[in-house]
Amino acid sequence: MDGHYLDCLRDACRRYHVAAHAYVLMTNHVHLLMTPSDGDGISRVMQSVGRRYVQYINFEYRRSGTLWEGRHKASLVDAENYLLTCMRYIELNPVRANMISHPADYRWSSYRANAQGEHSPLLEPHPVYRALGSEINQRHYYYRCLFEHQLDNKDLHAIRKAIQFSTPLGNDRFKQQIEAALGRSTGFAKRGRPGINSESEIYSQ
C-alpha cells in the first residue's frame, strides 16, 4: 500500500460523494470508515479504487491479474455509539500488529490528521468527531485522550465479528432499525453495500 492508493481513494470519494473519516493501509489489507450520500456510493468507490490501483500495481511491477482476494467486507455502524471506537480500532491496527508502539509513528493511517492536525485531502470530519470540541485544537486534544487506554476486548470482538460477517455494529435498537429498513434479518448479511443509507460504514479489504 502507498500514497497512490490514497490518491485513488480520494478521487473516488469525491466523484461518488462519499465522506472518508478514518483509514489504515496495512501490508495486505486496508480498513476504511466512510459515510455514503446514497445507496451505491461506497460500492462504486471500492470498484473504482480496485480498478485503478490494480492497473497501477500491474504496470509498476510488470505483473498481471487480480490483486484482492474476494470482495470487500462491509458493516453498517451505529455512529452515535461506535464511530469513535471504530476510528480507534482502525488507527490502532499497526500497534496491535506490533509494527509500531504508538499510532503517530505509522505513516499510512488517518491518526496524524485526526489527532495532530496533519493535512489530509482525503478526510472529512464526521459530526460525532466534530462534537469532541468547538475548536480544532480541542478536538485533536480530546481525540488523543481516547488513545490513552486500550480498546475494550468486548468492543474489539464486536467490531471483528461485524466485519467478518458483514453485520451491523450497534445496539439492539440500531439493528432492529436496519432490519426494518432491509426487510430481513441482519444475522449474516451479504458482502458489499446494503440497499440503504447509514450513518457510517467500516470496510475491510
Image: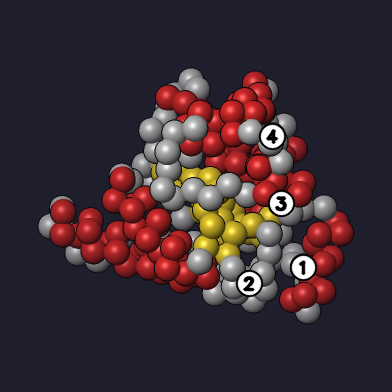
Badge 1 element: helix
Q: Quadrant of residue 67?
A: bottom left
User: Which mark sits nearer the N-terminus, 1 or 2?
Assistant: 1
- For disc 1, the marked residue is 178
Disc 4 to disc 1, C-alpha distance:
30 Å
Q: Can residue 167 be seen in this view?
A: no
Q: Can residue 48 be seen in this view?
A: yes
User: Which mark sits nearer the N-terminus, 4 or 1?
Assistant: 4
Instruction: Give the amino acid at mark 1.
Output: Ile
Badge 4 element: loop
- For disc 4, the marked residue is 133
Instruction: Give the amino acid at mark 2.
Output: Pro
> Pointer 4 and pointer 2: residues touching (CB < 8 Å)?
no
Is 91 placed left or right of 57 in the picture?
Answer: right
Q: Quadrant of residue 65?
A: bottom left
- For disc 3, the marked residue is 79
User: Which mark sits nearer the N-terminus, 4 or 2?
Assistant: 4
